[in-house]
Image (spheres, rainbow, N blue to C red):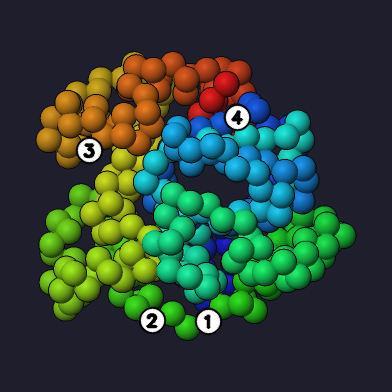
Amino acid sequence: MPRPPLDGLIDDLYYLEGEPPYARLMLPPIPGALLIVNLGAPFRIRAGTEIEAAEYADGCVVTVPTRAFEFGYPPRTRSVGVHFKPWGPAPFLPMPAAELCDRPVTVEQVWGRAAVAGLRDRLATADGPHEMLTLLEEELRRRLGETAGLGLVRRTSSVIAATSGSVAIGELGVAAGVSSTHLARRFKELIGVTPKRLARTQRFAATMLAIDFAEPIDWGDVAGGAGYFDQAHFGHEFRAFTGLTPTRYVEVRRRFLREHPDHVLDSWPLPAD
């Protein structure tokens, strides 16, 4: 966990090295954002089935997505990265987050080629993962600036997270003392999605992460417990977020758990091969 004030923007920093569990992984939408500084061979991202995969050599920035992404990995991968809170990237972006929604960009497009080349050189020659993460944290701390509206978005997003997305969206603006239009505009600027969309993503992610896929699953109970109107509504959300039916999702999730038990990536990504 980074030190303040970065801890209010970041969930964690990580180091990843080795052979990926699958050449391609599907990542359903999450209520968070991602920065990857790549130190190995290029990887590929396809942001939607109708979009061609793009190659990322230096790394990428992904704001809160609204669709599943597919990551394609080289035989061995090496990177350092940041799992941001939904509003976390905003102080480090030179553009509104809405411009990046479902459109991952390279780190060069955010920080510039010379700066990223220097950072990658320092990371590549660092003395082990701990020093690498310290260097990345220092880079983030150096680039941290003031962001208008961040406090408002952070407070209201935290309420959405604390309620697992079940809060009445109309009440958020009232509680914050702003109009729903103003709140939605700030969310789009700093997170890239509206409060309603973030709440949908938060609820779906919380629901899925609470399931024990090693046990039989009663989807009606899951849907009711998560506050979905009915099982049909839940099934619609399921396909919107994953492209899969619940039954197919369970098959793929269990394949991952069976073939790579206790893998660091086994809680959310799915094999796409």
Residue 139, quarter of the rendered image: bottom right
Q: Is residue 41 left or right of residue 5?
A: right
Residue 217, quarter of the rendered image: top left
Along the viewing direction, whichever of 165 and 2 lies nearer the viewer: 165
Labelled disc at residue 271: none
- Quarter containing the C terminus: top right
Residue at the disc numbered 3: 226
Nearer the N terminus, badge 4 or badge 3?
4
Q: What's the residue type where badge 3 is placed?
A: Ala
**SS assignment at label 1:** loop
Q: Is residue 272 left or right of residue 120?
A: left
**SS assignment at label 4:** strand
Percent position of residue 56, x then y: 66, 48
Residue at the disc numbered 4: 24
Nearer the N terminus, badge 2 or badge 3?
2
Nearer the N terminus, badge 3 or badge 1?
1
- Which mark lies nearer to you, 2 or 3? 2
Residue 163 visible, this orientation: no
Residue at the disc numbered 1: 145
Percent position of residue 153, x then y: 33, 70
- Quarter containing the N terminus: bottom right
Residue at the disc numbered 2: 148
Percent position of residue 148, x then y: 38, 81
Contact between marks 1 and 2 (CB within 8 A): the answer is: no
State how far apart marks 1 and 4 are (Cα): 36 Å
